Amino acid sequence: MIEALLAKQDYVSTVCANACALSEELVSGAATAIITEESLAGADRSALDAWVTQQPPWSDFPFILLATRRAGHRPRDAMLVLERLGNVIVLERPIHSETLGSAVRSAMRVRRRQYEARERLAALQLAEERLTHLNANLETRIAERTSELSRANNMLMEEVAERERAQTALVQSQKMEAVGQLTGGIAHDFNNLLTVVSGNLEMIERRCDDEKILRHARFAAEATDRAAKLTRQLLAFSRTQQLALAPLSLNALVEGMGDLLARTIGPRIDQRRVLSDSQPWVMADVHQLELAVLNLAINARDAMPDGGILTIETDAGRYAPEGAKPGHYGVVRVRDNGFGIPQPLLSKVFDPFYTTKPLGKGTGLGLSQVFGIARQSGGIAHIESIEREGTIVSIWLPLAATPDLDTELVKPISTSDRVRRKLNILIVDDDEGVRRFVAEGLESYGYHIAQAASGAEATTLLDAAIPDVMIVDFAMPGMTGIELAQAARKRAPDMPIIMVTGYAEEGVSADAGVITQILRKPFKIDALVGVLDMATGMMISAEG
């Protein structure tokens, strides 16, 4: 009846059959308990008494005892029960429902405040524990905080130093960029001059029968070849040199660089070579790979200021190195026993403008250029180093098939056994010497030549008549060679266009839509005629 009554007032009740069941429910949790007096008479109250006795300090569980109305004082046993229960509200029966509901609300309010007291007590205890812990560890925390501040200060100083180094490197790189642009311009003009000199020397060799004059001409031609190599190095320095990949013997490359390396690294360095018995051939640009090996040798020399051993090795690796595409590779290694590089810095050494050398002693471009050359060649560069023991830099390049050296790869084309169609060729170059040399050389092969000194003049000639082939310089004032080629394509989409250039910019490429062939300055007339033959689809026929 009481359960139904309380349910109408939205209270959830559980009916317990005896004192033992009540104690079990109290353990599970309750807000108050309603007990009839006769249910406790003669019952086993040990578990209930134990639970009441073991309540935590904040708890004083409220009981509602429904007693029988009596005349006079309550029996001693009944008083002992009330005393053991502790916090008891006694209601004599019969009782009104409102009285019972009021007693339940009052008991639940008391229990709720006990829970609030428990939470406050727990919070106070936690705060006390924290305070005790903080006081006990105050010195330790002060030391840790001091250490953290010290570390933060050190990091800040390192960042400031790194920023200053980066600023200095930026200024240095800007200077090197300006020097590179100047070098590229000088190399371009020098290539024009070499084209005129070597071209006229070639014409002298063709037309002169005087052996003494021919000998002097050959000496001069050898000098122009060395000068052409110098311009290639200048272009590589200015990073305007594209790679011309071709089969290359690593052993022959290393052997051929012996004298150059000896002059570069000096007598204090013991230069050694360990060449592979397998004679590896790789796909590489000979000039760029020479430059890469030379850069590594210079780095090795700088790492051994008091002398040491520089070893250059070649090998054929069967498996691709980490970071490279699957395949077979040839390897050239440059090994020294110098200072070495700290391990934390090894991940940075291939970054552009990063250098471990003092300011002014290096540009930070050497190793990045080595890495770039390896990547452009389809390979990869690796570095290993141990401080005070030395450094090994390996350049892995894709293996190439060994060429048949007995086969004549390039056969000179001679007018004595070939009959060419008499092509009309338009030559466009702002350098009069280059233009005159090309015109006279091609006229000696029977070509019909027209000349223009600028893109505007060439456009006028194209409007008048479309030639069979156009030979155009890349760098010209006003309209560049690329712009002229694009304009010519609109007038004659199928006309072969050959570009001759002293530059090797990334933008100058043999694009089937614009440029048919590219020829680098300086060049010989035979080479130009060969390019003409390829560009015009070999418009020649065997004599007879």
Image (cartoon, helix red, strand yellow):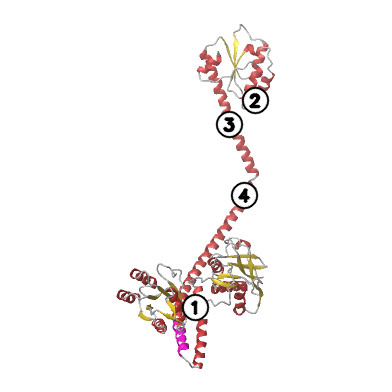
Q: Which mark is residue 231?
A: 1
- The answer to whether 174 is drawn above or below residue 451 in the figure is above
Residue visible at 57% across and 24% down in the picture? 111
Identify the magenta region: 195-207
- The answer to whether residue 524 of the structure is visible from this angle is no
- The answer to whether 543 is drawn above or below residue 39 in the figure is below
Counting every numbered tag in the picture gives 4
Say what amino acid the circle numbered 1 marks.
Answer: Thr
Residue visible at 63% across and 46% down in the picture? 138
Identify the residue position indicated by label 3 in the image. Answer: 119
Which corner quadrant of the image does residue 280 belong to?
A: bottom right
Identify the residue position indicated by label 4 in the image. Answer: 142
Tell me which label, 2 or 1, sits earlier in the chain. 2
Which corner quadrant of the image does residue 362 belong to?
A: bottom right
Q: CA distance from mark 2 to mark 1?
A: 98 Å
Tell me which label, 3 or 1, sits earlier in the chain. 3
Q: CA distance from mark 4 to mark 2?
A: 42 Å
Say what amino acid the circle numbered 3 marks.
Answer: Glu
Q: Position of residue 345 (x, y in %)?
A: 60, 63
Query: Label 1's element?
Result: helix
Say what amino acid the circle numbered 2 marks.
Answer: Gln
Q: Residues within 10 Å of mark 4 (few under 14, many from 20)?
A: few
Query: Label 2's element?
Result: loop
- The answer to whether 395 is drawn above or below residue 445 in the figure is above
- Relative horizontal placement of residue 57, taking residue 447 as reference (left or right): right
**As rendered, which of 479 and 355 lies closer to the eye?**
479
Q: Is residue 197 magenta?
A: yes
Q: Which mark is residue 55?
A: 2
- The answer to whether residue 74 of the structure is visible from this angle is yes
